[in-house]
Image: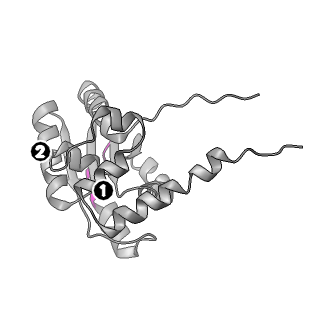
Amino acid sequence: MLKFNYEKLAGSDMIYDFCEFAKKHNYKIFFLGGKIANNKIAVEKIREQYDITIIGYSPDFEDYPFSDKFNSSCLEKIVAFKPDILFVGFGAPKQEYWIDDHIALLSEIGVKYAIGCGGTFDFVSQKIKRAPVFIQKIGLEGVYRLFQEPSKMRWKRLVDSCKFFKYIWHKPDFN
């Protein structure tokens, strides 16, 4: 019988490790997405804390699939900066789709790491407080975030996340 061990590694946890890594290797970092103000503050805080080359860009919100104008504006800024590390904060699964859609170009311009990081820029900017560790460990950060920022979108994301449980409790019949 196969056993899977897994560990959740949130973008908001590993971003600081990547900043240390960037400092050590003189890598450039680009923050894409999030709220405009939070992206800007997060860039400033990381620049001050790690003394690394970093910029950010936050396009206007769009639903996926993104328009050509949206993609062009993002890619134009990324291509001009040529980061080594790209953090994409569009929220799951949009950020993963966007990275996958553009992975060839990102690789071509020298992006070594492209990481979907959800609301990480909100946490780095300290505009949104992260859930306490025990809530993180039991996987209820979405519920905590809903109480911090109640919205129709957060309710929808929480309901969509719960659909995953049917796959956990369903025991497949391999006979």
Disc 1 packing (10 Å; few <14; some 14–19; many ≥20):
some
- The picture places residue 144, in percent across and down from the top left corner, at 30, 48
Return the residue at label 1.
146
Front in this rendered view, residue 95 or 24: 95
Query: Outermost residue, right direction?
Result: 175
Q: Please indicate whether residue 162 sits to the left or right of residue 63 in the image.
A: right
Q: Is residue 119 magenta?
A: no
The residue sitting at 16% across, 46% down in the picture is 125
Residue drawn at point x = 24 percent, y = 61 percent = 58
Query: Based on the displayed image, in which of its 4 quarters is residue 168 positioned?
Result: top right
Visible in this render: residue 80? Answer: no
* First along the sequence among labels 2 and 1: 2
Name the residue type under label 1. Leu
Quarter-of-image position of residue 139? top left
Extent of the magenta region:
77-84
Apparent side of residue 74 relative to residue 57 in the rendered image (left or right):
right
Circle 2 residue: 44
Q: CA distance from mark 2 to mark 1?
A: 27 Å
Say which amino acid is labelled 2: Glu
Q: Quadrant of the N terminus?
A: top right
